[in-house]
Amino acid sequence: AQSVTQLGSHVSVSEGALVLLRCNYSSSVPPYLFWYVQYPNQGLQLLLKYTTGATLVKGINGFEAEFKKSETSFHLTKPSAHMSDAAEYFCAVSETGTYKYIFGTGTRLKVLA
Amino acid sequence: GAGVSQSPSNKVTEKGKDVELRCDPISGHTALYWYRQSLGQGLEFLIYFQGNSAPDKSGLPSDRFSAERTGGSVSTLTIQRTQQEDSAVYLCASSVQAWGGSDTQYFGPGTRLTVL
C-alpha cells in the first residue's frame, strides 16, 4: 500500500535560514505529489503540486519542491524562512486513476527570531 | 470566489449524543471528501462522494458514522452516540473531479468536535 513518510515531526529554523522539510513516498509508479500548509485553526492550503513535466515545482510564498524518482522523494524547500512560515506542513500523494490522497503525519515548522 | 465552508466551526457535545457536521463545497465541484484529523495524527480519510454517490466509505471508523450528499452539493457527516475518541477536527474538501489523481483538493476550515 502507498505510504508517505515525513521525517521530523517538528523542525526549527532561524529567521532567514533555509527551510527543508522532507517527504518520501513508497510507490513503484510515480505518483502525483502535493504539499499543503495548515496555519493554526485553519484548513489546509495547497502550496504546490507535481503531476508531470518539470521535476522542480515552484509554489506560493517562495516554496519549491523537487521530485526525485530515484530517491522517491519530494522535499520542500525555501531559501529564507520568514516568521509567517510557522505552520504545519503536510505531504500527500495520489496515484493515477485514483481519487484518494495519502497524507504524511505532518511537520510542524517553528521559525526562531 | 467562495471556498469550502464548514459549520459549525466548533461543537462541544456530551458522550452519547448525536452530532451533524455540514460541508458546503466549492460550486461546480463534483467530488467531496471527509477527513478526520486527531491530535498528533495525520489526516485520516473517511469517505468520498462523486456527485451524490459515495463509492468509497471504507474510512468510516464504525457504523455510528454516516454521511450523505444532496443535490451534488452540501454534505452532512453524522456521528451517532458520540464517544470521547470521536473528538477531532473534521475536515471537508472538494475537487472539480476525482478520477485521474492529479486534481487539487480544496479544504474547508474544519469543525472541531469535542466530546465530553
Image: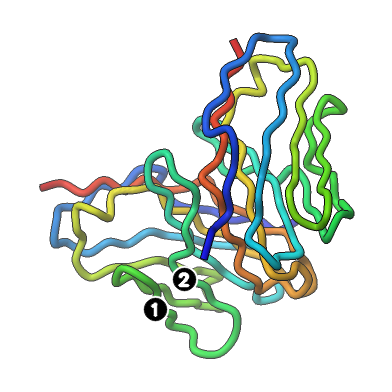
Q: Residues within 10 Å of mark 2 (few under 14, many from 20)?
A: some
> Residue A51 falls in which quadrant of the image?
bottom right
Secondary structure, mark 2, is strand
Identified at 80% across, 30% down, the residue is B65
Identified at 75% across, 67% down, the residue is B98
Disc 2 chain ID: A
Q: In screen coordinates, is A89 left or right of A102? A: left
Identified at 36% across, 71% down, the residue is A60
Image coordinates of residue B20 in percent, x first then y, are 72, 29
Which residue occupies the foreground of this view, B57 or B14? B14
Q: Label 2, on which residue? A: A48
Q: In screen coordinates, is A5 left or right of B47? A: left
Quick check: A80 above or below A69? above
Three-letter amino acid code at disc 1? Lys
Three-letter amino acid code at disc 2? Leu
Identified at 73% across, 13% down, the residue is B17
Q: Going from the N terminus, do you reach mark 2 or mark 1 first?
A: 2
3D distance between C-alphas at marks 2 and 1 = 7 Å
Circle count? 2
Disc 1 chain ID: A
Secondary structure, mark 1, is strand
Pointers 2 and 1 in contact (CB under 8 A)?
yes
Q: Residues within 10 Å of mark 1 (few under 14, many from 20)?
A: some
